[in-house]
Each structure stands twice: as C-alpha cells, then as structure tokens.
Image (cartoon, rainbow, N blue to C red):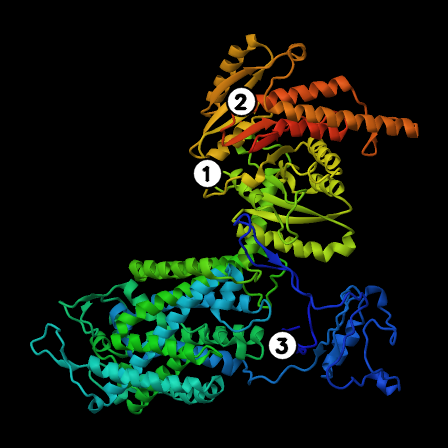
Amino acid sequence: MDNEDIEGGEEEFRAQLGRKYRPVVAHDRAVLQMSSMDPGSTSDSSPKNVKIDGKENMGSDAREGSAPDNLRVNGSERDSKLELFGFDSLVNILGLRSMTGEQIVAPSSPREGRDGEDAPITYGPPKPSDVKLGTLMGVFIPCLQNILGIIYYIRFTWIVGMGGIGDSLLVVAFCGSCTFLTSLSLSAIATNGAMKGGGPYYLIGRALGPEVGVSIGLCFFLGNAVAGAMYVLGAVETFLKAVPAAGMFRETITKVNGTATPEPIQSPSLHDLQIYGIIVTIILCFIVFGGVKIINRVAPTFLIPVLLSIFCIFVGILLASKDDPAPGITGLKLKTFKDNWFSDYQKTNNAGIPDPNGAVDWSFNALVGLFFPAVTGIMAGSNRSASLKDTQRSIPIGTLAATLTTTALYVISVLFFGAAATREELLTDRLLTATIAWPFPAVIHIGIILSTLGAALQSLTEGREPHIATFFTAFICIGCVIIGNLDLITPTITMFFLLCYSGVNLSCFLLDLLDAPSWRPRWKFHHWSLSLLGSVFCIVIMFLISWSFTVVSLALASLIYYYVCLKGKAGDWGDGLKSAYFQLALRSLRSLGANQVHPKNWYPIPLIFCRPWGKLPENVPCHPKLADFANCMKKKGRGMSIFVSILDGDYHECAEDAKTACKQLATYIDYKRCEGVAEIVVAPNMSEGFRGIVQTMGLGNLKPNIVVMRYPEIWRRENLTEIPATFVGIINDCIVANKAVVIVKGLDEWPNEYQRQYGTIDLYWIVRDGGLMLLLSQLLLTKESFESCKIQVFCIAEEDSDAEVLKADVKKFLYDLRMQAEVIVISMKSWDEQTENGPQQDESLDAFIAAQHRIKNYLAEMKAEAQKSGTPLMADGKPVVVNEQQVEKFLYTTLKLNSTILRHSRMAAVVLVSLPPPPINHPAYCYMEYMDLLVENVPRLLIVRGYRRDVVTLFT
C-alpha cells in the first residue's frame, strides 16, 4: 500500500523515536555523544487505540443494528476468528471495504501499543491527483515524437547518399537493434513492480545503486537538453529554407563538384539560426510551464501533421516518375537502386556539401553517430512514468510499438530514397523530402517544424519538475542553440543516450543474472544474454563514433558518481548491486569451506567487546579507543571487525532497545571509519551472553578468531566484586572455544591515528602462541602512529645456560618470518632462588605486599565461611581448591615479570606480554590479583593469548 493512501494527522500520530546521535567534545574527541529524545508516549502498556478520522464506517455491523462507536481492532467490542494471529481479518479490512471506497481502520498487532500512544490512522480513497495517461498518449505518442525528429527529414536522405543503400540499411539495423534490445530491458525493469517518477534515474538507481543512477541519469538529462537544441535548430533551419525572406543575414556556400560551372547553394546564416532558435526555445519553455496536461493537449497537434507529411513523402516518391518534380529525382528505378547500393564516402564542408578540400571526412562510424539520435526517444514514456495510469502495461507496449514502427519506417525509407533519386541529388538537397513530397513542399516544411517542435517539447518535459529545473534545462538548450551546428551537436547527444541505454541494459542484465526472489517482471520476453548484448552494442557504438567523446562522457559520469559517493546520503533501495554482493559473499563463504585457513591467508577477525566494564556514558555505545585499536589490527584496513555489546535483561522486553542500540553502535562504527558490523545480544547476564556469542557468532571461516576487550582496571577501585568471576569466565570460554584473546590495559592512553609514537614495541614472549604476538607487532608497524617504532623481543629463559641457544633460535625464526626485531634473552631465577633471596626492592614490592595481604584476608574469609556452613571451600558459587604455596608462587612469578617489564620497557610505546591462563579450580579473585600485579605501573600493555594454530608461516 502506497504512502499516499494513508492519511493521518501529524498531531495525533506519534511514532516512538529512538536515540539519535550528535557528536560532542568530551575527554576524547572521538567520543560520539548521543542524546535521548522524549519518546512522546506514556508508560501505559495497554494496546493502542486506533481512532478513525471522520464518520464511523457503516458496514455489515451497522445494518444489523450493532454499529460500534469506535472500531477497535483488538478490542472486546468485536470478536475475530483470527484473533490467535494478532490481526483482524485482512480480507474484511483491506479487501472488501477498500473496494467500496470506505475509510478503514489499519490492522494492528497486539505487540504494538506498549508505549500507550494513540495512533489514529485513516485508510481511505486516494487523494485526487492529476490526470493519468494511457499507453497511447502517455508512451507511444511521446516516443514517436522523440524518435521521428529532424534527422529523418533533413539528414536521412543525405545519409543514404553518402553510405549507399547497403551501409544505410546496416546503420539502421545496427542502431535499431541497440534500441530494441534496450526497450526489452526497459520493459522488464519497468514491469518489476510499481514505478515512480524519475525515468532512467529511477530504473538504473534501483538496479545499480543510487550513485550509478544519479551519474547516468544526469548524463541522460544533459542528452535530453542538448537534443532539445537539435530539434529547435532543425525547425529553425527548415523554416529559414522554406521562407528565405525571414532571414536577417545571408550566407552563400559555393558547391565544388569538379564541373565547369559550380552551382551556388545558399544555407541559413549562423546568426539567424541563433536568434530564431533562442526565441523558439523561450516559447517552448513557457508552454512547458503549463504542465503535462497542457502538453498532452498540444501533442496531437504536433503529431498529426508529422504523420501526414510522412504519408505525402511516400506518395510523392510513388508519383515521382510521372510528375518529374526536380532534376535528379528519377522515381522508383532499378537502375537508380543499383547505382546507390554501394557507399561513396567523401569529404564535405561544414554544411555537408561534397568538397574535395572539405574539413569533414565521413565514414561508416561517423554515419552511425549522425543517425543514432533518430532512434533515440524510447525513454520518453518512462520519463513520464509518474503521469501514467499503469506503468507496467503502458511502458512495454508503448515503447516497443514505437521502436518497431519507426525502425520499419526507416528501413522502407532507405529502400525508397535510394531508388528514387540520384546520389548527387541525395547529397546536395538537404530538404529532398520536401522536394519530392506530394502535392507541394510546404506540407513537409510544416511537418518538419511541428515534428521538431513536438520533440523539443518532449525533451524539455519529464514530469512534474519545478520551474527552476525547467529554466536550467532551457538554459542548457539555449547554450547549445548558440553553437548553431546540427552536425556537431548530434554526436554529443548520441554519447549521452548510449551511456544511458548501456546503464539500462546492464541493470536488466544484473537483475536477470542474479535472479533474486524479488525479480518477477511481468514482461517475460527478456534474457540476461540479450541485455548483455544490448549493453555491448551501446559501448561499441560509442567507440565507433568517437573514442574521445566516449572518454569524455565516461569521465563526466565518473566524476558525478564520485561526487555522489562523497556527498550523497541515499537510503537502501534494494538495488541489484547489493544482491550481487550478497551472492558473491555466499559463494566466497562456501568456497572457504569449514577447514582451517592456511596461515598465509589468515586475517584477524576481532570480536570487540564494547562495554564489558568500565564507566562509560549510557549514550556512548563503545569506548572510542577500542575502535582505534581495532583499526590497528588490520593491514591497510583489510579485514572485518565485529563489535558486540551485551544488554542485560529479558529478550522479549528488550528487543526494541537492542535494535536501537545496534543502530547506534553501527552509526558509531561508521563515524570511526572502522570496517565492521555491530551486534547487540540480550542475555540474563554478561557471562551467559558472552558464552552464546563465542559459540554462535560468525559463519564458517568468517567467525571471529580474536576476542578483544578492555582490562578491568576499576574493579577494586569501584569495589565491583562480580568482575573477577566474569573476567575469568570469559577467558575460559575463549580457551574452550579456541579463540585468541587480546586484553588492552591503558586503553584511555591508546593513541589515535594522528598521535605519532616513538620508542619500541616490546614483546615478552613467554609461551608459544602460534606467532600471534609477533603478527600483532607487525600490524602495529603498518599504522602511521607506530611506524617510527622498533620491535624488541624479550624471551624468558629458565636457566642462564639456555640464553644463548634460545637467542640464536629466535633470531633464526624471526629471519625466516621476514620480521626485523632485536632479540633480548632474560633468565629468570628458579623458585628456590627467589625464596632465598626474596623479591627485589623495587616499586612493584608495595603492590606485591598489598596483594599478599588481600589474598590472605580473602582466603581467611572463605575458610571461615566454609567452616560455618560445613561445606567445602566455595568461591563464586563453585567449589575451589586452594594451595597457598601455589598462590604464593604465582604472586612471585607475576612480581618478577612486572619488575622485568618496568626495568626494560618503561619507555616503550606499547608492551605485549603473554596471558597466563586461569588455573583450574582456582578462585577468580586470586587470579585477578595476579593480573593486577602483572600490569602494575605499566601504562600501555597488550596481554595476548594465542590459540591452537599458527597464524604465521616460514614458507613462501
């Protein structure tokens, strides 16, 4: 149902508005502040009351004496047999009542109206609109007027004389086939659903995207505007030749034919063409202001004399052998037909008169460019689609009928003209059609003038344009009229029209080849191969005419396309390119299979955990630096990121909030220029939500392989005691699901793309991680922020004797990986040596002592609670096993590692260290203490854990 059929007061209908974005400057300039808008509804959860504007409908209930005051779709006043489905009977509401023209109540779902707003919507008869046109007046006549233009009357006989009958038939067949195939494609697209105004822009934009539609549509508009100038010049030239006394200037051209007595031939002055052309254009412009209705009344006035003039031409040809109208006109003679069969390409002057020293050299390609505007005009019906009663019926029938009619007329005309006059007469008499016509030339003069003016009127009319657009079109038309050379204008028109026709054919080819479920055109006589052939024809004709004109037109379309891509904000029209992308993605996904990707083809697909913890404003969907870090994990922007946020609550209650949040997050991702998708998951709690995400997110080999989240630095400061169990659970879920983990500490200090870093990128490579830590460091170097840094790899050796061997092995390994880095081996003391010598007296010692004290208190409380309740040791609702000596050992290990990091990497741009896995049956609180001690006083740290596969390879 069209939007025009829905009438409702703006004051009474209030749709619930979601959150919108407005960027503000906060602590980080990348933060996007979003303000919540008043939804304008109450908190009542009762269903909507659907009111009706105007009087109550008098249906069958009224006849039975039970007319309700208000028809409530889901109310108790009327029982529905389809109440189970949540909708009233669609047959009763939208079928029978709409046929009688009654105003009806919109069907509503019981799920609507939870916000308690009243939504008065009125369905009734459509508003009265302008007069609608049928096939004859809306499509056939406009197409016929555009096609039967000036080329047929004053250039067609010249084309037959220059190219001969054979080449002329080939030119007609070549150009006619192009427009016929384009008409088939146009018919298929136009019958694939309701079509609004816009012509080729609407057709191509819905198939190839709005950017392509705008670029080709504007070129087609320019072609129409220039074609209007061609028609005006043709009318003025004919008028001045018919009435030479009307000319204010005189210009004589001498014919050079190699004879002893050259014949002077007069042609209209350029200044006369300019002056009269501008006057005629202005008059046509005022007629266009009257609207389509006025033009439709004027159109038969222009068309009837045209058809009469064509009839007089053929009668004159049949009677030429008896009447002998002029020298060189032989009538239908076989000898003349044979003499004119072959081509006679030669040079001419600018007026088209044969001249051995002429500046214009004609060929078959040039004839195609000159003749092609005579077959254009097939888009005249689609240009006025908004004024048609039934576009799906009128456009195919009217367009194809006009195309076949004019093509047949051209073929017959080639044969008749070639057999009725000598080649010299065909080349010298530009108004041979008037000379040969019966009973007198004035009939043809009137027909030419009315034909060209009618075609010019159609070129200036494309529906319900504003007056400014009409003025602009007239301005372009006047600019081309000032040129005054018909033969110079026609190739420009040809290029623009061919570009548009190629776009129509490509659109049908794409839609037919993809064959999406929505592609169901009523016009069945089409095939993707024919559309492809039509598009190839268009491109070939463009290059045959002039490769330079072709390059210029394609460059213009490309510039418009680029500008629209930068500035345009068109919505999703469901164009064919989106369908092509979808099918290409499906085929690519199937080709990847379910097997593991080879390390050479491995790409990081990070799963960005947007808001696991940490205080962010409710209207900020993601920490701004997480998007910056996601960009750092891609090489030259290649790769995909999945931004995920978990919404606590019940899915049925929070579904709409989740959709709103997903839109906000997607907008934020685009704002940060990060290639990725947004997902919002509703779950009872964060742990359950993440567990579902890590199991189901992604398809095939496009599942996320790295989980990225912020380190919970605030858990102790804010006394968030639930964070340790959640944090440990997420890490364990990643290990079980075989996902790599990257935890960012110091996220607030992470540099953006404009903050250049210096120093080193230090890697503390403790355990084998498949080379993920090395790969991340190399990806960081590809960004401008870190390109000035150098990589240092710190390897931890248990004994001093292993240091040199380990260093040599790591250097060889990095060399084979094509990675440049400095290798530093650090020997860690054994456990016994640590206990004998004690921890080093450095700044980490205070944190170590405080952690010891907190763990001791925590274990004491846990033991007291277990003794009190008579149960085993429990932590976070789970039984745990605590080995105090092991706890102490873990604390010493993290203390030594933290001390080493602070000693060697205090000035590093970023530090990467291996993530220790949570011990089994170990309290999550103790693990968080180990991690806090590990990251203590390190400003910017990436804690990395790989998974059970290599992401780098030594082999080519």
Q: Residue at x 58, y 30 (%)?
A: 937
Q: CA distance from mark 2 to mark 1?
A: 24 Å
Residue 606: x, y in percent? 60, 39
Residue 320 visible somewhere in the drawing: yes
Residue 833: x, y in percent? 64, 10
Q: Residue at x 7, y 76 (%)?
A: 260
Vertical arrangement, residue 22 with respect to residue 81, above or below:
above
The type of residue carrying mark 3 is Glu
Locate the N terminus by quadrant.
bottom right
Q: CA distance from mark 3 to mark 1?
A: 54 Å
Q: Nearer the viewer, residue 656 or 190?
A: 656
Residue tagged by mark 1? 785
Please state if 517 lies on the left or on the right of 601 as rendered: right
| Nearest-to-viewer mark from 2 and 3 | 2
Q: Which badge, 2 or 1, comes first in the chain's sequence?
A: 1
Residue 59: x, y in percent? 81, 84
Residue tagged by mark 3? 4
Residue tagged by mark 2? 903
For residue 256, which numbered disc appears in the image? Answer: none
The type of residue carrying mark 2 is Arg
Q: Residues within 10 Å of mark 3 (few under 14, many from 20)?
A: few
Please tell me whether mark 2 sits on a helix, a strand or a loop. Answer: helix
The type of residue carrying mark 1 is Ser
